[in-house]
Amino acid sequence: MKDSNYLKERNAKSIWHPMAHPADSLNNPPTIVTEAEGTRISDVDGHQVVDAVGGLWNVNLGYSCEPVKAAIANQLDRLPYYSIFRGTSNDCVIELGDMLQDFFAPDGLTRAFYTSGGSDSVETALRLARQYHKIKGQESRTKYLSLKKGYHGTHFGGASVNGNANFRTAYEPLMPGCFHIPAPYTYRNPFNETDPESLAQLCLQALEDEIAFQGANTIAALIMEPILGAGGVIPPHESFMPGVRKICDQHGILLIADEVITAFGRTGSWTGSRHWGVKPDLMCTAKAITNGYFPFGAVMIADHVVEVFEGDTEGKAAIGHGYTYSGHPVGAAAAIACVTETLRLNVKDNAAALGQQLFEGLQKLYDDFDMIGDVRGGHGLMCALELVSERATKKPIDKVTPVKLQKAAYESGAMIRVSGPNVILSPPLVLTAEDVDTILAALRSGFQSL
Ligand code: PMP
């Protein structure tokens, strides 16, 4: 490894970072992470902290998951690559397909379409949704609905259904035919409604209103995260997703669950849809499917959608979509080991229990620091603090303070993520109670230092 001075000096002179201003990366050198073990990461200066970000919501089993590492190494030795485009397959994707069929059976999902990550999974689901309607002879169903505050990756399709201007404005014009409805975001919403159940009803009414306005027969699908993640961890009232499912059914609109974050246990249930008792028509997964060790994803497809595609006799269901790395054997081998470990360790239960401990600890911080306007969580290991400069008026925080908080918390033992006014916590699901205490103590000392 090159020495620390070289790495710090060269970083922003040779690369641009995703989700960063290139000039900011030059002026404020990032933390250079060089090693990791269990739930902890170490930087180039040897400082070790608990990773409260879990990589990027993906390292659910921590950094020392030997079965996944071994599966990758062995597969690289045996078959490092082969495509699964028409005419060829590999043993790993077939074995994984069977595993995913079992894993997602309670969600009613019976086929997998492999991708190389979350944005690819979203793109795949959006495309398959349009094609589904075309196969059925409903060519006019091409539009998409989604939630404001939703995050669906950064491909043009995903960015078009994305509900945050930060990921849209610089890249407009986006895809036509995408329409957004209000999110069930109790802290701030256009209805000034603070009761989660009433707000869920109002958002559902807005959805019905938009469908009536657009015409149901023009809409292909609605895409949503069961719990909004990157938009600031927004858990809806339990009536919301079932309500969306019902409305979609009434109007022949497919429901795409974007579970790039929530699949594989993060919410305390195996999937976010299952958490709310909903069966989606398509489900986007990625991230934790390989514990973040290899870029990989899968779109899971509901049985009734499968029937439409597989029953087509007119050639309309030929899939003109796929990636060089769809079904990468190393990714599939990693996923087989990862799903096996995920089930063996039953990480969803630890996510539920420690998610509660973390959420309660954050509520105590709320009592002590006025800068915290809202605490969100309560469904597994995904929590957020929304920072404000004045609690009474909910005046948004300035841009600098969250960054200072992040630095101070890091010095005190925890890597946290700040995104706009939100502190986002998404640690590995194999976290311990002591790790939770470390995260909370680091946050407390971060707030005290401001
Ligand atoms: N959908 C959701 C819900 C996500 O959270 C993300 C990434 N955070 C994506 C899609 C995009 O995934 P990727 O960054 O792997 O392309």
Image (cartoon, rainbow, N blue to C red):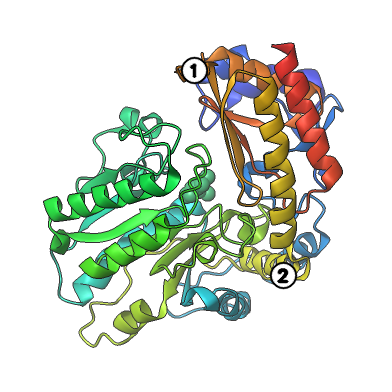
Q: Work out which quarter of the rendered image holds the C terminus and state it.
A: top right
Front-most of 153 and 332? 153
Residue 87 percent coordinates (x, y)? 44, 80
Amino acid type, residue under disc 1 in the picture: Ala
Front-most of 300 and 352? 352
Residue 161 seen anywhere in this rendered image of the structure: yes
Picture quadrant of residue 15? top right
Residue 383 percent coordinates (x, y)? 61, 41
Residue underneath mark 1: 392
Picture quadrant of residue 345? bottom right
Amino acid type, residue under disc 2 in the picture: Leu
Residue 86 percent coordinates (x, y)? 41, 77
Front-most of 59 and 210? 210
Q: Secondary structure at mark 1?
A: loop
Label 2 Cα crowd, 10 Å radius (few <14 / some 14-19 / many 20+): some
Label 1 Cα crowd, 10 Å radius (few <14 / some 14-19 / many 20+): few
Q: Secondary structure at mark 2?
A: helix
Q: Judge left or right: residue 268 versus residue 272.
A: right
Q: Which residue occupies 61% across, 75% down?
A: 96
Q: Work out which quarter of the rendered image holds the N terminus and state it.
A: top right
Residue 152 seen anywhere in this rendered image of the structure: no
Residue 440 percent coordinates (x, y)? 76, 32
Front-most of 119 and 205? 205
Any mark on residue 343, and which? 2
Q: Judge left or right: residue 21 versus residue 55.
A: left
